[in-house]
Image (spheres, helix red, strand yellow):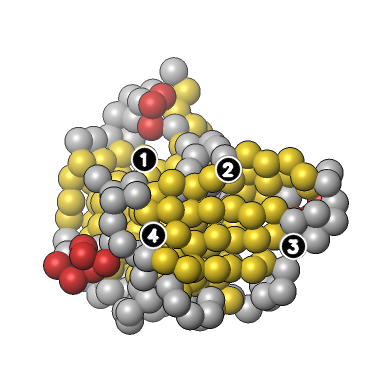
Amino acid sequence: GAVVSQHPSRVICKSGTSVKIECRSLDFQATTMFWYRQFPKQSLMLMATSNEGSKATYEQGVEKDKFLINHASLTLSTLTVTSAHPEDSSFYICSARDEFQRTVVRGSPLHFGNGTRLTVT
Amino acid sequence: TQLLEQSPQFLSIQEGENLTVYCNSSSVFSSLQWYRQEPGEGPVLLVTVVTGGEVKKLKRLTFQFGDARKDSSLHITAAQPGDTGLYLCAGASGGSNYKLTFGKGTLLTVNP
């Protein structure tokens, strides 16, 4: 089945530094990837939609300059948390949709990465 | 903004009991998906329902999509400790981006 690889799985950084999280679709192409944030025992909150070759679309309340998204290829999207602060500590998850499945399978699901636990000290 | 109300938010039951999780909205979705998530991992897809009134079964799990495609339910029969996890429903809106709207999740604990 389709696999989405997210790296790193855990990262600890100091306040004020930047952290980059990668999301790769391993065996399919993904024009669109999605970035979510999740607090403990809560649901996923969509942060932004990453579009290959164009600017990301951010959800209301998400700072574009703080959460930089780059989707340079059909298999890779990156999320960079700039000037991280302790309140940015969270579980970040990416997802991607198989473009082939989108055309042949109605209701084609998203495939999720295993998440990145970010801790800012 | 499309909203999905998921209930209950927390559920703690004994092994062997049955349970139902509900997902309701005032909006119509083109499809609805159910995921299960374990701590520290990403959600794993359980099922996708696309047709109003559709019922899908996955071993002891039964998923139903409402006739109007605004609500869905997940029923687990004879729950086992291995069913413990966070269950998420997610509705898909149409369009090329296929953005998912997630419910708040149901944290299920099945005690042995």
Instruction: Have a look at marks 2 and 1 and say if they share a chain.
Output: no
> Which kind of residue does numbered mark 2 sit on?
Pro
Nearer to me, B41 or B53: B41
Q: What residue would you read off at disc 2?
A: A8
Q: Label 2: how many residues lie within 10 Å, few (<14), some (14-19) or many (20+)?
A: some
Look at the image and tell me whether residue A33 can be seen. Answer: yes
Instruction: Have a look at marks 3 and 2 and say if they share a chain.
Output: yes
Q: Label 4: how many residues lie within 10 Å, few (<14), some (14-19) or many (20+)?
A: many
Q: Which mark is residue A75?
A: 4
Q: What residue would you read off at disc 3?
A: A82
Between marks 4 and 1 in the image, the one whose residue lies nearer the viewer? 4
Q: Is residue A83 above or below residue A103?
A: above
Quarter of the picture containing the C terminus of chain B is: top left
> Which kind of residue does numbered mark 4 sit on?
Thr
> Which kind of residue does numbered mark 1 sit on?
Leu
- Tell me whether circle 3 and circle 2 mark residues in contact (CB < 8 Å): no
Q: Label 4, label 2: how many angstroms apart (C-alpha)?
A: 16 Å
Q: Label 3: how many residues lie within 10 Å, few (<14), some (14-19) or many (20+)?
A: some
Q: Secondary structure at mark 2?
A: loop
Q: Is residue A11 above or below residue A92?
A: above
Q: Label 3, label 1: how many angstroms apart (C-alpha)?
A: 43 Å
Q: Label 2, label 1: how many angstroms apart (C-alpha)?
A: 36 Å
Q: Chain of mark 4?
A: A
Q: Label 3, label 2: how many angstroms apart (C-alpha)?
A: 16 Å
**Residue A43 vs residue B31: left or right?**
right
- Tell me whether circle 4 and circle 1 mark residues in contact (CB < 8 Å): no
